Image (cartoon, rainbow, N blue to C red):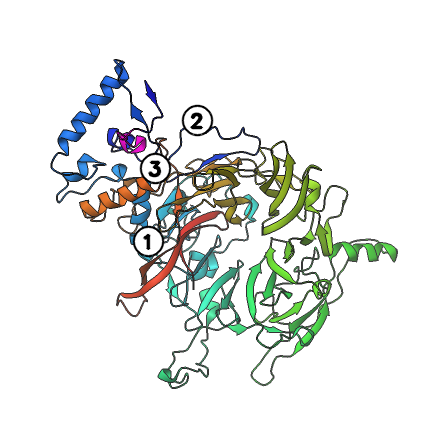
Amino acid sequence: MIRINPSPYRFNLHRLQHLASPSRSRPPHHLHRQHHHSAPHNRSSSPRPLQPSVALVATTTTATLALALLLSSLSSSSSSSSSPIHNDESRSINAKQPATSDLTQQEKMRQRASLQGVYAWGSNRYNVVAPDAPQITFVKSPRSIPYFDQVALRDIVLEEKHGVAVDANGDVLQWGLGFFDSTCRHPTPIEDIPLGRRREKSFSNEKSPMGPMALQPLPPVHTLKGKNIVKLAATEEKVFALSKDGKVYVFSAIRSLQLPTKPPVWSLNPLSLFGALDPPTIDHEVLTLSASSSLARGEVIADISAGQSHLLALTSRGKALSMPLDASANAFGQLGARKVFLNSPTNSNQAATLVETTFEPRMLQELEDIAEGSSGKAMQPPLPLTEPPSSIRYCTTLREVPALRSVKIAQISAGSEHSLARTCDGRVLGWGRHTHGQVGLGSNLALECVPVPSEIVLSKCFPNSSSDVRCTDIAAGGDNSFFMTTRREAGSGGVTEKIDLLAAGKGQWGTLGNAMWSQVQSQPVRVKTVSGLMEYSEATNKTHPVPVYSLSIGRPGHCALVLDTVEAAGHAAFGRDVMMWGANAAFQLGTGRRSNLAVPQHLKPLPPLTASAGDDQAEQQPQITAVDPQEQEKLREADLNSGALTHMPHNRLQLASKSRADTRLPQTTDDATVRTKKNVLIEETVKAGTVSSVVYWKIHA
């Protein structure tokens, strides 16, 4: 019989479990989670990753004899040392390192932090997720890109036809078949990729290449340098880069259109003779603001977000700006304004001038034609002579959204053809396309577009017992919108705080995460599995809501979410759970299967880094870094004492938290010297792209 007893003969249950099964990997999950409808945590019956004090009472039961024999064998093996042994195998390790399967989850995360790397999966039709293996059409599960081994990045964006990233120095890298060869760009809609019989085969790139460069491994190359870029936003044809000093640069996503290069400009750096020694850069432009949207002293642009044909920007003082990228930029009112400033064509004899014109939403133009008795298709007014929409100089002027001039905005996010904004007091405004309900204004509004910012009342999504509903985060992508909310709910146990994730828009691929496949969802609904999630804290002896740490929405409609777990102070091996769901036609969910998911699901742990360029992930050998056995045992001791290990086996992807490490700078084509950035603050991050996804180490600049 085992009972709680304040006896001096105590032992640690979890340490004993670790001794009994040293080779099993255990999750760094020191808190038990339950949904909002779950029963309260039973501390007397449910297993907890604590170290309870128990004592053996004299008895003749079989359990006692077996336990005594186990303790006796362990004590005899450690008679020469008083320190506890957690894995006898680690004592016998000499030159041979443990296999990957023998490492705990915490050790795998520490190893990834030292190795770093970029893992990508999904559509590789344009050699974006696997530029070293152009013969592969689909990467069905996470696979590392060898070029980025031991490299951390400030930001990365994966479009279907090209990829773009920022290294630790703030320089931009670009790659992809659509970047190197503009002739291979096929105007196939995202929703139809991939549908053809040939493209459904995993090696259709090799059997039916799209161009002369399609089967050539094309590593990333540096393009825009010396601008100290911290964030990226991209479309199929253009790339927008936000610098640390608040400037927004625009340049082409096609290499041939980045020529001719621009001469160096004046710089504050005296080591380069104030810019005279700087190399020429690619062709680019810097975005400006209209006269009516000028910035105050010390105000800079702090964030950018790009849709399919429009760009949103946010200043450091909460001013929301927008800009068109082509003639359809306001077809559904996603700009939030009718007046725009375009650039007239430039030549060697005449400088560019601003041309003010009107972009009417399509619905309003049709209504005007009906009112005037016009028959036939509605026609837009003739546009002035401007730069072509594919040019980076088509429009370079940001303008403040008129309806938001008196509203301080805390966050912006752009979907394909709609826009979202969150205020500092937790309210949400939406405008743009509403054909699938993506603006989230409810079923009472049966319009295809919302031309002006309108408030989304999220309190309607909860019962009357809920109060103080606030939005703390927003995310838009494709034809979907997501809102993370906090609220207080009165119950039998008193008032408790709840955290929910709401979704609206197109759900035909399961993107709403509510186990439904709705085509239109205009009233936001709760995402299953991650909404109302609670965890029990041993530190406070209370249950707390589990927030969403990050959320990324890809096109045409898949989601990558990271749950925020409570971390012990000074213990860096706690991981954050990753959940994926939504569209999966190109294996962008990374599950290895092609079926869409209507409920968030875990991923398997990341495999080792790709052994060499062009290798298939399935053929890799385990990659192990040298670890001192004594140091490994100390780390495992810290994991056990922190409560990170439980007796529950698991096999899921968890991302490592922030830590400082050295990171390698990507090599350039003209210089093979290996350079390193010292003591950089990095964090493992997941991001959804266009029919692709990526896990990388993000640098906090």
The kind of secondary structure the magenta stretch mainly shows is loop
Query: For the point 61% across and 43% down, which residue is it?
Result: 503
Nearest the viewer among 30 and 310 is: 30
Query: For the point 76% across and 45% down, which residue is it?
Result: 445
**Drawn side of residue 197 relative to residue 379, left or right:** left
**Distance (Cα) linking label 3 and label 1:** 24 Å
**Drawn side of residue 456 relative to residue 99, left or right:** right
**Residue annotated with mark 3:** 645
**Distance (Cα) linking label 2 and label 3:** 19 Å
**Residue annotated with mark 1:** 116
Kind of residue sitting beneath label 2: Ser
- Give the quarter of the image for residue 75: top left
Q: Is residue 9 magenta?
A: yes
Query: For the point 58% across and 80% down, which residue is it?
Result: 347
Query: For the point 56% across and 59% down, which residue is it?
Result: 305
Asked if residue 506 is positioned above or below residue 414 in the image, the reply reads above
**Residue annotated with mark 2:** 44
- Magenta stretch, residue numbers: 7-16
Secondary structure beneath disc 1? Answer: loop
